[in-house]
Image (spheres, grey):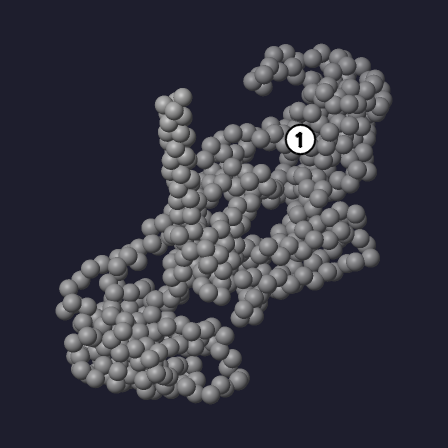
Amino acid sequence: MIYFDVLYLNEINAVISRMKKLFFLLMVLFCLPVMVYGQENNFTFSGKVDDCKTHEGVSGVTVKVVGSDGTQVSVMTDSTGNYSFVNCFKLKTSYVAMININTMTGPHKGITYGNSSWAWYEDYGYLNSSDKHIFSFSESVKTQHSDFCLVPTYSCMFPFPDFKFKKNSTDFFLVQEWMYTNGNDTALDCFTALMMAKKNWVIEIAGHAASDEKDKDQLAMARAKRIADMLIARGIDPKRIQCVSFSDKAPYEYKDDKGQVIKTAAKNSEENRRIFLSVISKDYVPKYNDEITGNVYDCKMKNPVKDVKIKMIGSDGSSAETTSDSLGNYSLKSYFKTGITYIIKAVPVDSTGRSKGIKYGNCPSAYYENPGYLNSSDHKKFTYSDTLKNRTYNVCLAPMIIDYIFPDFHFKKNSSEISTVTWGNDETSDTTSVDCFVGLLMANEHWTLEISGHASADESNKKELSEARAKKIFDLLVSKGIDPKRLFYKSYSDKYPYEFRDYYGKIIKQDQAAINIKSRRASIILLSKDFDLPITPAVKTKSTDDDGEE
């Protein structure tokens, strides 16, 4: 009995040991992402992937984010096309978001119009998008939002109905190719829905008659006009419809599945008592009955933003769009219907997430900023009525700006005399970089900067020397016209030696001599972007070091 109990206890202890190991492994798996990315940052990057045409969310799309530190994370869009990354990001790191639509390109998706069961549909997939969104975070910016738009690729089939008529009459009794619709009215409703969705189509209604009918030419035209009147009564613009009469000159043709003519009906056949629908143009510009105007502007700087698409989407499938002008103004004209709900949204054109180089003076390409605007989630929604016309909707776009590349000013040993200036991958000994930097500051007059003075470990009087170096750059910039109220300078002695880094921001080991040379410098830090020109805050020319030294 004792032996049995010992074995039993051993088994229990073994199970407990395995459970402890499993618990530890689970803790590592769940806690590691928090340890790596820092739960305290709580950074969030989210957005939506839409169909560029229907503006509906696209599910199953992989959104991938690559950081400048080499990290990679990905997530798939949900059933509504939305995605979100939480606690996956760090400070002082730039990220690039891109999408991959996996197996979405090519598969077909049927779209029906009205109550039609099969006859009108579009088969489409999506083209892979090359659009990349660039973003970063700071202590004050912890949420970023970017929307993607996928371009559909189409393979369309529209077998239009043939309306058949009674002899010597404009009363129709059969809809060829529409045997799965529930009656003639349903077929007309379905075709009307298709015309509403294809608002740029112009159709021809060709009237026909059999040879044994009376007044064949007039009868054929009357049949075409009968269908046209019914479509117009359902809301189709009469300018989009053209009626023609073929009398009995174009007998009905029987065709196989490939569209090849098998035989032609006899001229007196009842098959000839019909109308035939065809699209003759796809560039019709619809008329409008109302206009929405507004202004698109930068949420922070309040400056106008041009070339932004303003899209209107109706609950009936209608849509319209326009683009903001150089002053940020837009005018959206469309045919609005009472009782229909509309959404107005803004989509920056070729700027959301894309880099746009801006050169200052004769600066080389290394000196640039990458501005863009996040897609606005501030959608204006309203239900149209005749009592509320000529609406005005202003749109505010949140700017997205990449970290700027600022120059480092390097000095001779134990001296405040500038030896070289490095900016990005360029190093010069002339004033080109200084002039370029001044041009950058002139173009961004709301910036406030700190000039940080540093010294190397092998220099004497490090505190005073690093302060003299910062003051040197301060005086240089002020002499070239920069408002001293925008500049702060501070001494850091030798507390922060220069760090050599690779493309991904990882530190590269160097010998102490090389570190000392690079550490004799003055660096630029962007403190804020909201310096108010009319208000003049007190000038700060010096600041106390962290350890209290002057």
How far from the left and from the top, in percent, is residue 38? 42, 56
Q: In this view, does 77 lie to the left or right of 437?
A: right
Q: Which of 141 and 54 is in front in this view?
A: 141
| Secondary-structure class at tag 1 | loop
Q: In this view, does 10 lie to the left or right of 196?
A: left
- Quadrant (top left, top right, bottom left, bottom right) of the C terminus: bottom left
Vertical position of residue 382 compared to residue 237: above or below = below
How far from the left and from the top, in percent, is residue 81? 56, 42
Vertical position of residue 105 compared to residue 217: above or below = below
Q: Which of 117 and 251 is in front in this view?
A: 117
How far from the left and from the top, in percent, is residue 495? 27, 73
Instruction: Find residue 518 and report its image quarter.
Output: bottom left
Q: Mark 1 points at which residue?
A: 112
- Identified at 29% across, 65% down, the residue is 424
Q: Which of 206 and 442 is in front in this view?
A: 442
**What's the residue type where badge 1 is placed?**
Thr
Q: Estimate how packed mark 1 is, as few (under 14), some (14 to 19) or many (20 or more) residues with alpha carbons within 10 Å.
A: some
Residue 399 visible somewhere in the drawing: yes
- Identified at 18% across, 71% down, the residue is 516
Instruction: Find residue 226 and report its image quarter.
Output: top right
How far from the left and from the top, in percent, is residue 333? 68, 54
Q: Which of 539 and 387 is in front in this view?
A: 539
Vertical position of residue 403 compared to residue 377: above or below = below
- Identified at 40% across, 72% down, the residue is 526
- Quadrant (top left, top right, bottom left, bottom right) of the N terminus: top left
Residue 246 visible somewhere in the drawing: no
- Identified at 70% across, 37% down, the residue is 195
**Residue projecting furthest to the front:** 2
